[in-house]
Image (cartoon, rainbow, N blue to C red):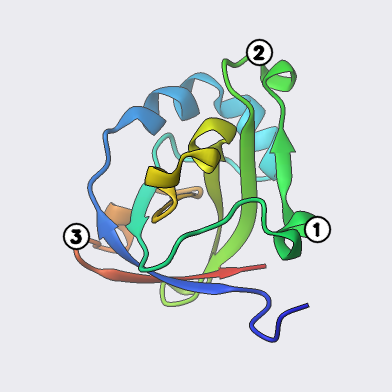
Amino acid sequence: MPTNFPPKFIGRVQSGQNDASKWLALFNDDYSRKTGMRIFPGSLNLGIDQDFDWFAPELEAGLIRFNKAEYSGERDILLLPCRLSNLGGRRGFIWATTNAARDPTDRRVLEVITDVKLRDVCRLVDGDLVEVQLT
């Protein structure tokens, strides 16, 4: 296992397309059951300086797979538990569809979901830095 495990990423807050809010609201009970926490219906997009590989062997043990059949959705979902180190160690999850995880254009964006609207609670604006520690 690499010495930098579990990995840590520094991401810069950036605006998204507000698409996550629709799906996280529609299937909130399912996401809450899968993650063990109530999920705010929206994500925080973080631009990172390196490619993120959802399928890296060292991430496999922590990867949570959420099959579309489990929640009657349209896409399979991948989740990785994390802590937002510089936001009080708040617990959350990095979240992606399997399609997005395979798309090379999406590898420099992490979408974080948690129990609150991070922009409001932590007073975040585009350009702020957030430290994500995988757990």
Q: How many marks?
A: 3
Where is residue 40, by image quadrant? top left
Query: Looking at the image, is mark 1 or mark 3 earlier in the sequence?
Result: 1
Mark 1 or 3: the one toward you = 1
Where is residue 14, by image quadrant? bottom left
Element under label 1?
Answer: helix
Task: Give the distance between the C-alpha atoms of the residues marked 1 and 3, in whole angstroms.
Answer: 33 Å
Find residue 72 and name its label.
2
Q: Decide: marks 3, 2 in contact (CB < 8 A)? A: no
Identified at 67% across, 58% down, the residue is 56
Q: Is residue 85 visible?
A: yes
Farthest-out residue, front:
104
Task: Give the distance between the C-alpha atoms of the residues marked 2 and 1, in whole angstroms.
Answer: 25 Å
Q: Is residue 117 visible?
A: no
- Compared to residue 69, the image places residue 16 above or below, namely below
Identified at 55% across, 28% down, the residue is 28
Find residue 125 and name its label.
3
Query: Looking at the image, is mark 2 or mark 1 earlier in the sequence?
Result: 1
Identified at 28% across, 59% down, the residue is 13
Relative image position of residue 49 (x, y in whole percent): 36, 68
Relative image position of residue 52 (x, y in whole percent): 51, 58
Task: Give the distance between the C-alpha atoms of the residues marked 3 and 2, in whole angstroms.
Answer: 34 Å
- Compared to residue 30, the image places residue 104 above or below, namely below
Q: Which residue is mark 1?
A: 61
Label 2 neighbour load within 10 Å: few <14, some 14-19, many 20+: few
Quarter of the figure that contains the C terminus: bottom right
- Residue type of the residue flagged with mark 2: Ser
Query: Looking at the image, is mark 3 or mark 2 earlier in the sequence?
Result: 2
Where is residue 121, by image quadrant? bottom left
- Compared to residue 108, the image places residue 5 above or below, namely below
- Residue type of the residue flagged with mark 3: Val
Going by the image, does 22 lie left or right of 35? left
